[in-house]
Amino acid sequence: MRKGIPSRAGLADAVMGSRAEVVMLNRGPFLREAVALLDGILRRMEAHQYKKTPRLRALRSWPLPGDGA
């Protein structure tokens, strides 16, 4: 939020936030960008987590060979 580039720890916290009921953000000049990034991460992680139980699904972070992409 302060520099406009997410840190590795910040991204890990966002991913783990998918297990929580609430995610807290600090103040900073890049609030809109941080909320948009967090929204994208939480939407993608939604398929991998149900409440506190992991679903163990494939992450699909990038196209695999033969996926037609």
Image: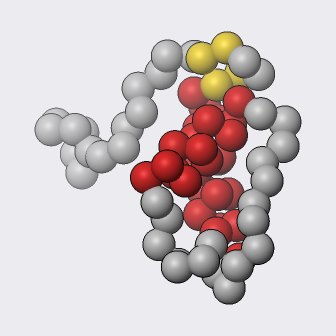
- Whether residue 44 appears in this view of the structure is no
Q: Position of residue 54 (x, y in %)?
A: 60, 17
Q: Which quadrant does the N terminus fall into?
A: bottom right
Q: How is the image coloured?
A: secondary structure
With respect to residue 30, does 68 lie above or below?
A: above
In the rendered image, which quarter is residue 59 located in? top left
With respect to residue 36, does 43 lie above or below?
A: above
Left or right of 42 in this view: 20: right
Left or right of 12 in this view: 2: right
Left or right of 50 in this view: 9: left
With respect to residue 3, does 69 lie above or below?
A: above
Q: Position of residue 2 (x, y in %)?
A: 60, 77
Check the image and name the residue furthest to the left.
Answer: 65
Q: Position of residue 28 (x, y in %)?
A: 70, 79
Q: What residue is shown at x 64% (from left), y 57% (from top)?
A: 38
Q: Toward the viewer: 49 or 26?
A: 26
Q: What residue is shown at x 68% (from left), y 85% (from top)?
A: 29
Q: Where is residue 60 in the image (x, y as percent from the top left)?
A: 37, 38
Check the image and name the residue furthest to the bottom.
Answer: 29
- Whether residue 25 appears in this view of the structure is yes
Check the image and name the residue furthest to the right.
Answer: 21
